[in-house]
Amino acid sequence: MELNVLRDLGLTEGEIRVYLALLELGSSTAGKIIEKSRISPSKIYNVLDRLIEKGIVSYVIEGKTRNFKPAPPRNILNYIERKEEELKRNKSEFEKVIPLLETKRQGAKRRFTAEIFEGINGLITVFDMSLHELGRGDIFYSFGYPAYASELFDTYWRSYYKQCDRKGILRKVIFDYDAWFLKKRTGRKLSYYRYLPKGIVTPSCVFIFNDKVATVIITPEQKVCFLVQNKEVSNSYLAYFDLLWKNAKAP
């Protein structure tokens, strides 16, 4: 017998077994229902009470004994209609609280999280994070990239840029002077470069993507990233990036 529809209506396995047993037994005592449905005696009255509440089972008292009776299968349609009405009411009530929930969500956005990543693999974890989060037309920003980092991560960035090209992610990068002239740069699809004037050396580099700002320190002695997730912080760094971009030199 196809019973998935009963499960989809919210009836438990025990409720289905008891109702089917009653359909075969007709009016019956709890003892016979236990025997037929193989429901635990400790659970039978809980199951029957739930079916009574759903309007699928009724009972009469004869002497001191309760005899249970199944409602006709077509009466289950009444149960479905009641569920539909309940869903409509719930939908209406939920629509009223959506503005409040949205306010809470916006409040959560204003909060921020901060994490620390250490070592080469830790930094790569952050860089990879941008690959997973960004999509076609999104921009990955970077400024203050030093020469040592350029040498250390050269192989990784070659692979990174190829993956960005496949996903349609744009890159806007402001290099330190020494990092830019470390070697001859070849044109990269979807990449836009500028470099800082000679003599300006940044002790750290910054990467911005979505609502995240990664401040990275890369030296022979230390490789660490401070990752902050907050839209307001991200926007403030983007404003700083735009200022640097206007004053940086184009190739």
Image (cartoon, rainbow, N blue to C red):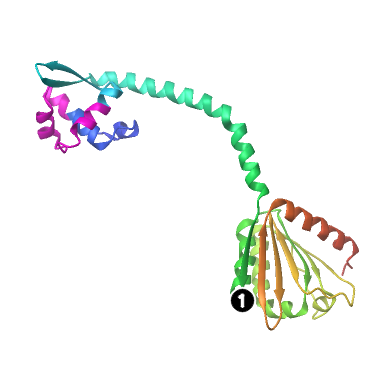
Residue where numbered disc 1 is placed: 119
**Residue 79: x %, y % from top left:** 33, 22
Q: Position of residue 154 (x, y in %)?
A: 69, 77
Residues 47 and 19: in front is 47
Is 248 placed above or below 198 here?
above
Q: Measured from the top left, where is residue 179 in percent x and y? A: 80, 77
Quarter holding the C terminus is: bottom right
**Near-viewer residue (75 or 232):** 232
Which residues make up the magenta segment? 21-50
Q: Is residue 136 left or right of residue 203?
A: left
Q: On the rendered structure, is 48 left or right of 67?
A: right
The residue sitting at 72% across, 77% down in the picture is 149
Secondary structure type for disc 1 = helix
Q: Is residue 55 visible?
A: yes
Rendered position, 153 above or below 50: below
Front residue (pair 58, 88) = 58
